[in-house]
Image (cartoon, rainbow, N blue to C red):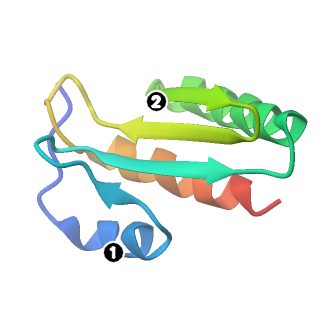
Amino acid sequence: MTQKIIDRSALKPLLDAGWEILDGRDAIVKTFKFKSFRHAWAWMSHVALWAEKIDHHPEWSNTYNRVEVLLITHSCDGLSDLDIKLAQEMEMASSF
């Protein structure tokens, strides 16, 4: 079972990048906006491969050029290092 994160200092750069802690849930959320649907889909494809690699999958939805993301680790019912890693990869991929 994955452990919840105890040291929350890793969240600060993500919060500075626009991630928010979801009210009432130990989860983080962000809406990414891209130039077009094609760019949003390409980003989602990249992130999906990364998520498979680390065996951790986001809750997300896509509408045209926007992707709404919620990250939580269900096995510990809260944030874990996997959420931080996936959010960091999402940030890096969104800058391409």
Task: Note whether 93 is above or below 54 in the view shown.
Answer: below
Query: Could you tell me residue 43's position as x and y percent?
Result: 75, 40
Mark 2–mark 1 CB contact (< 8 Å):
no
- Please state, as top left, top right, bottom left or bottom right, where the C terminus lies in the image: bottom right
Query: What amino acid type is highlighted by mark number 1?
Result: Lys
3D distance between C-alphas at marks 2 and 1: 20 Å
| Left or right of residue 63, residue 95 in this image | right
Residue under the image location 61 percent in, 38 percent down: 67
Under circle 1, the secondary element is helix
Task: Note whether 92 is above or below 43 in the view shown.
Answer: below
Query: Residue 12 bears which disc, if any?
Result: 1
Query: What amino acid type is highlighted by mark number 2?
Result: Pro
Residue under the image location 15 percent in, 39 percent down: 3
Query: Could you tell me residue 17's position as x and y percent?
Result: 50, 71
- 10 Å neighbourhood of mark 1: few (<14), some, or many (≥20)? few
Residue under the image location 19 percent in, 23 percent down: 75
| Left or right of residue 28, residue 64 in this image | right
Q: In which quarter of the image is residue 52?
A: top right
Q: Residue furthest front?
A: 64
Residue under the image location 83 percent in, 35 percent down: 37
Give the mark nearest the N terminus, 2 or 1. 1
Q: Nearer the viewer, residue 15 or 89?
A: 15
Under circle 2, the secondary element is loop
Query: Could you tell me residue 55's position as x and y percent?
Result: 47, 24
Query: Residue 22 bears which disc, if any?
Result: none
Q: Nearer the viewer, residue 61 or 45?
A: 61
Residue to which mark 2 is pinned: 58
Count how many numbered circles sit on residues in the image. 2
Query: Could you tell me residue 68's position as x and y percent?
Result: 52, 39
